[in-house]
Amino acid sequence: MTATETRPPATATGGGREVAVDLLVVGAGPAGLYAAYYAGFRGLRTALVDSLPEPGGQVMALYPEKMVYDVAGFPAIVGRDLVAGLVTQAARFDPVYVLGERAESLTDEAGHRPRAGDRLVVTTDKGTRITCGAVVVTGGIGTFTPRPLPGGDVWEGRGLTYVVRKLAAHTGQDVVIVGGGDSAVDWALALADIAASVTLVHRRKNFRAHAASVADMEKGPTVVLTDAQVDSLEGGPVDGGEALHTVHVRTKDGTVTPHKAQAVIAALGFTADIGPLERWGIDIVDRKILVDTAMRTSVAGVYSAGDITEYAGKVRLISVGFGEAATAVNNAATYLDPDQPLFPGHSSDDPAGLGATAHA
């Protein structure tokens, strides 16, 4: 099964649809998909809700063909392949996907603020009501919007892009990448042997990317321009339309130099909004959900894992999110049924994949 072949929602979308499960995972990114697998291993019927139309979260939305280096057991793995593997892993337990819908409100079954022991109801922006015993929020950074390249809006779709969905689309092109973070440097490395030329423009001297990646880029064919920024984009008529052909780059001393380019990748980061979660009564600081060592939030029955969480010593890596997801699910299982053990045993001891059964 690939990431685009995930099981569709159990019934027709919208229109007051009702879904009843043991556990709801809010966010279908890597941490959420692993939480769905682990919940199935614990015998919990699970649903995932995500505002994006496909599983994978930021990985599929922003860098599906970028290499991911921080997942245990994989020296490197393409983003979409990681997501496909997680979807296949979770499919063993047949989770319900509620995609293209945003989790809006959290109440008890009577529509009031929930208390410990209540069945929880999460209602989406399309009217779907998901009733569950517990919730694990794995919403990454929430909804996200790429930061725009100043003056570039008229060239979007005509040479300017914020996401590289297919590396092959840039085969033989002169590519200018704008940015100084991991995404910008990773794209430069990935396109070095595919594009005709790669130029990276960064407005500062120092990069925010991993030092080893920056060193690899600087040893390769990429032209690196620091203390510089894009001054303007220029294009001309192509096949009855207009397409980009030149990027003008201004250096710190004011000099403006033209660079041939049929493509500009603006990797300037993105703005995040956790939106309705701020109205759930959860303790949130700087758009991050505060959790304890059991991944519990301040609301009984609601847990959290992944990039959206915050605690002392937090490290935001996909691999860390996987561990947090397992911790959240196991603690949610004991919340749903206190007679169940916190430690579920090893998956290698359970070839049938049944795990311990816990129900709300």
Image (cartoon, rainbow, N blue to C red):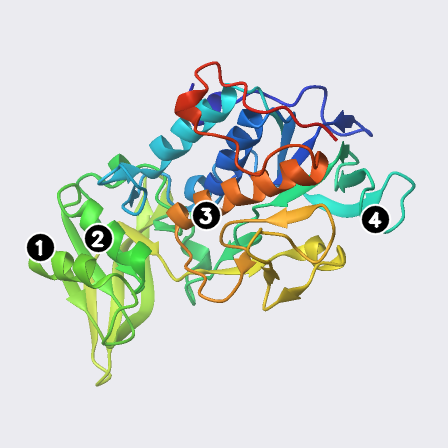
Q: Marks 2 and 4: in contact by CB < 8 Å?
A: no
Q: How far apart are marks 3 and 2 (CA)?
A: 27 Å
Q: Which residue is drawn at 43% across and 16% down?
A: 351
Earlier-in-chain disc, 4 versus 3: 4
Residue corresponding to mark 4? 114
Residue 100 seen in this snapshot: no
Task: Please state the horizontal and vertical placement of residue 267, each as a whole percent of the image.
Answer: 36, 58
Q: Residue at x 20, y 64 (%)?
A: 211
Earlier-in-chain disc, 2 versus 1: 2
Report the side of 20 relative to 233 (left or right).
right
Q: What element carries label 3?
A: helix
Question: Which numbered circle lies on residue 294?
Answer: none
Residue corresponding to mark 2? 188
Say few, some or many: other residues with alpha carbon within 10 Å of mark 4 (under 14 / 14 to 19 / 20 or more). many
Q: Which of marks 3 and 1 is in front?
A: 3
Report the side of 300 relative to 42 (left or right).
right
Q: Distance between the residues labelled 4 and 3?
A: 27 Å
Q: Which residue is drawn at 58% across and 51% down?
A: 294
- Amino acid at the residue labelled 4: Pro
Q: What element carries label 2?
A: helix
Of 204 and 93, nearer the camera is 93
Earlier-in-chain disc, 3 versus 1: 1
- Amino acid at the residue labelled 3: Gly
- Amino acid at the residue labelled 2: Ala
Task: Please state the horizontal and vertical placement of residue 133, each as a whole percent of the image.
Answer: 74, 36
Q: Marks 1 and 2: in contact by CB < 8 Å?
A: yes
Question: Which numbered circle lies on residue 220?
Answer: 1
Question: Which numbered circle lies on residue 321?
Answer: 3
